Amino acid sequence: DMPSGIYNLQVVGNAGQLVVNRQVLINNAGQQLSLPLESLSKGVYVIRASNSETGLSVSTRLVKM
């Protein structure tokens, strides 16, 4: 559950390259977001969401096969 606010979403590849960088507005807890990941090559990626107002930062790992 992430508090409402503007978040910076980043998808970072194995070599540290930034492949997606966008700002999104989260209006409520449990809101689902869509990221255009279909064009990514196979590999391991890190997805990060951060809110500069609250200092909240979360990340997860994505393995695309």
Image (spheres, grey):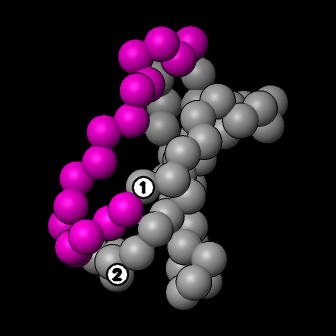
Span colored in magenta: 25-42
Out of 31 and 16, give the one closest to the viewer. 31
- Residue at which label 2 appears: 3
Q: Residue at x 48, y 38 (%)?
A: 62
Three-letter code for the amino acid on which mark 2 is drawn: Pro
Quarter of the picture holding the C terminus: top left
Q: Is residue 46 visible?
A: no
Q: Residue at x 46, y 68 (%)?
A: 6
Residue 10 percent location from the top left of the image: 59, 47
For image coordinates 40% across by 75% down, the residue present is: 5
Mark 2 or 1, nearer chain start: 2
Give x and y (percent) for residue 25: 37, 62
Is the residue 19 above or below the residue 59 in the image?
Answer: above
Q: Is residue 59 above or below residue 47?
A: below
Which residue position is annotated with label 1? 24
Would you say 49 lies left or right of 25 here? Answer: right
C-alpha gap between disc 2 and disc 1 = 13 Å
In depth, the one of 62 and 49 nearer the eye is: 49
Q: Secondary structure at mark 2?
A: loop
- With 35 as the anchor, is 54 left or right in this view? right
Amino acid under disc 1: Val
Most frequent secondary structure within the magenta stretch: loop
Residue located at (42% from left, 55% from top): 24
- The reply to whether the magenta stretch includes residue 46 is no
Secondary structure under the numbered disc 1 in the rendered image: strand
Image quadrant in which you'd find residue 17: top right
